[in-house]
Image: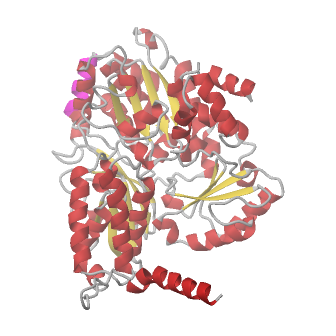
Amino acid sequence: MQLKIQTILDRYGADKTRLMDILWDVQRSDGFISEEATEALAEGLNMSACDIHETASFYHFYFTQPPGKHKIFLADTVIARAKGYEQLRETLERVCGCAFGNVDDSGTFGLYDTNCIGLSDQEPAMMVDDIVFTNLTPEKVERIIAGLKAGKSAETIAGVDRLDPAKIEYVEALVEDNIQNEGPVFFRADRDYPTLLENALEMLPDEIIEEVTNSGLRGRGGAGFPTGLKWRLGRDAEGEEKYIICNADEGEPGTFKDRVLLTRSPGDVLLGMIIAAWGIGSRQGIIYLRAEYWYLKAYLEQQIEDFRKHGLLGNNILGKNFDFDIRIQMGAGAYICGDETALIESCEGKRGTPRVKPPYPIQQGYLGMPTSVNNVETFAAVSRIIAKSADWFNALGTDESTGTRLLSVSGDCERPGIYEIEWGVSLNKVLRMVGAVDPMAVQISGPSGECVSAIQDGERLFCYSDLSCNGSLMIFNRHRDLLDIVENFMRFFVDESCGICVPCRAGGVDLYQKIRLIRAGRGSEKDLADIRSWGTLMHATSRCGLGTTAAKPLLTTLDKFPELYEKLLVTPEGPLLPSFDLKAALQAHEQAYQDLVQEKQS
């Protein structure tokens, strides 16, 4: 054990900030992170065992107990639940011989729930070890498990065992890209990256930043902060080192555009990162890739290596006295790491706990140095802006919302997948484009976004001043139980809270209990008032974006579909609220009384 641990530590120079990678290597070697391994790591990194366990226990995909030879994660999403999730869950428990959250008696199968794995366009889906299986049916699940029982690997069952994981064919065999339309900015074929970068490096760093600023590009991760301004602040910030981080932790349920960009246009993303580094003055870049996209890792590493071979990464890039390189940092399953400060904490080998701001990452980020964190789509857009000009990009979209944006469309529609739209397009036009089937509600930007009415809000526009979409569009028809969807979203926020601040830690649980209460027919007008006031309090006082938006599934549906709540409300009879279950409250007392009577009789 000691020799194996030492080999892993040597691989990373016993650098405690690389603890995420170290833990991954230990788990992939031994199957889990044992107490013995934890003690050895603590000694080798000059940390306490508690410090190691603090990180290992925070993330969904690290295991500190044997998880089963084959780890099976079934995606529990509202889209999957509309397409037979419960049947699949029952099938898995039956054929694997254990309940979810457990390992079967033989130690062969471990069954686990997980949230969205970036495949909402081809749900139901699951991960078996590192391999994803999509468009599942009970029959398909039975065949997969039968294959595993027969000794086949997940790769063999998926038909990719003879393919090179570093090649696009491997990824294509596992996952469809579902690009549904051609737009002017993204997925352009046959781009000459050496020439494009050579032209970009002919510009001064200040000119790069000025061009991005003049394009009006705003961050495509959701916050919408002006990209040029962020880069200007980064260039002006003081620090011995400056870092570029690509946020590919695409954890917002219903979002999968970054997955497709990394598959179909990885070069655009890498080029955008290099341009950002030239503008800011950075020598090191990191792609933070969510664990659910492990099947993309070898492919992306090959893309990075190809850039190095062409002199586009490394030392003295294109002879310009410019050094910059990129590494991939694998996440381990934590939605909160979509927050840029939580992501930075994770990159440093710690729990993904959001930092208090200010200071902002562009001032003090990774390792305390100025750090620009941008979304995958943002970097891809930059690569086109520098190639085509700010004026070209400005001519797309609207005056205040320039360019285009990618939509990840799923749910009740005929053509789920990726759509590139210009800002300024109406919701109605998009619904027609995707073949929405009898739409009632549309969830914009995932659970943390806004639920709108397909009827009342059809003429609203996608732009930063109206429907400021982060890339996710989930469509629900009139046959869906919208409050069931709301309950699912609220449980998601409870599960994914880091627990560091009270408004989110306690408020999320309280609001989740409120929607369950209302759906059970035991809610009153007071409960609706509590939802509004508590949701406002969480928005105002939570530490990060998760807490500030966690109440939105309740608040936005309550605003747009109040009748769904009101029809379930009851009027209090007597002094007790309908939410108070008198029978349940007295149950323990009654049981104690019966036990006492029985004791006296005996």
Instruction: Name the colour scheme.
Output: secondary structure
Give the percent coordinates (x, y) of residue 451: 30, 66
Pinpoint residue 346: horizontal percent, then vertical percent. 46, 36
Left or right relative to 435: residue 147: right
- Residue 242 lies, with reference to residue 191, above or below; the image says above
> Residue 291: which quarter of the image?
top right
Residue 247 point in image, percent of width and height: 41, 38
- Left or right, 153 with reference to 472: right
Q: Is residue 517 above or below residue 300?
A: below
Residue shown at 31%/16% (left/top)? Answer: 239
Q: Is residue 352 magenta?
A: no
Task: Please indicate, yes or no, whether residue 477 appears anywhere in the rendered image.
Answer: no
Which residue does the image show at 35% across and 60% down from the upper left? 508
Residue ID at (44%, 47%): 250
Task: Give 468 or 162, whichever is nearer the viewer.
Answer: 468
Dividing the picture into quadrants, the one containing residue 48 is top right
Region of the chain picked out in magenta, as a range: 205-214
